[in-house]
Image: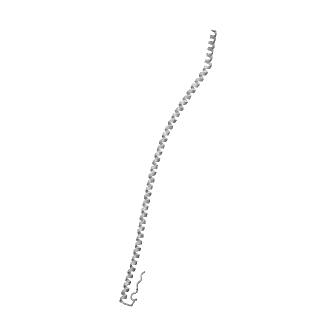
């Protein structure tokens, strides 16, 4: 029994030594580790909240960028339509102008052709009239000579011949 009492005394001394010296160190280390884990958990929670806010902000920015892109595409499409319409109006005006110019050129050419035809016709009429008059004068001249020869036979110089070129 002495052994049991000595073991018991040893156990009690060891317990008191551990309780006063070792256990407070172990407890303080555990408390520090607990606080550190709690701080890390709080930091992780805050980081998660920051990450969630950033994700929400990114989603909002992406949505805004999509809306701005769509607005820009719509505006660009509208500008393309307006430019196409403007080009079509300009093209129609140009075609109309060229058509009018062509009509004026045709009318001018037609008037010029008519004037040339009239001038040539007038020249032909004058030339024909001159020939007809020359032929008529030659016929009259011949009649006058015949009449003169009949009135004075043998006198060829009674009526001088008229020549017209």
| Lateral position of residue 6 relative to residue 97, left or right | right
Quadrant hosting residue 42: top right
Q: Nearer the viewer, residue 37 or 97?
A: 97
Q: Nearer the viewer, residue 97 or 114?
A: 114
* Residue at x 40%, y 76% (from the top left corner): 128
Q: How many marks?
A: 0
- Residue 31 position (above or below residue 80): above
Where is residue 76? Give x, y as percent.
47, 47
- Residue 41 position (above or below residue 87): above
Where is residue 29? Give x, y as percent.
60, 23
Quadrant hosting residue 26: top right
| Lateral position of residue 33 relative to residue 85, left or right | right
Q: Nearer the viewer, residue 39 or 10?
A: 10
Quarter of the picture containing the C terminus is: bottom left
- Residue 54 position (above or below residue 157): above
Where is residue 101? Give x, y as percent.
43, 61
Quarter of the picture containing the N terminus is: top right
* Residue at x 44%, y 59% (from the top left corner): 98
- Residue 92 position (above or below residue 74): below
* Residue at x 44%, y 58% (from the top left corner): 95
Where is residue 10? Give x, y as percent.
63, 13
């Amino acid at each position: 029994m002495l052994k049991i009492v000595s073991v018991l005394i040893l156990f009690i001394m060891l317990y008191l030594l551990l309780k006063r010296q070792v256990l407070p160190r172990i407890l303080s280390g555990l408390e520090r580790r607990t606080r550190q884990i709690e701080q890390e958990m709080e930091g992780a929670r805050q980081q998660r909240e920051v990450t969630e806010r950033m994700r929400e902000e990114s989603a909002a920015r992406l949505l805004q960028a999509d809306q701005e892109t769509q607005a820009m595409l719509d505006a660009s499409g509208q500008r393309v339509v307006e430019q196409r319409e403007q080009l079509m109006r300009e093209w129609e005006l140009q075609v109309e102008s060229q058509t009018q110019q062509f009509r004026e050129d045709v009318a001018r050419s037609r008037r010029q052709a008519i004037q040339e035809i009239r001038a040539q016709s007038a020249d032909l009429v004058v030339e024909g009239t001159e020939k007809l008059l020359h032929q008529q004068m030659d016929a009259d001249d011949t009649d006058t000579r015949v009449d003169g020869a009949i009135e004075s036979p043998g006198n060829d110089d009674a009526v001088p011949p008229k020549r017209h070129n």
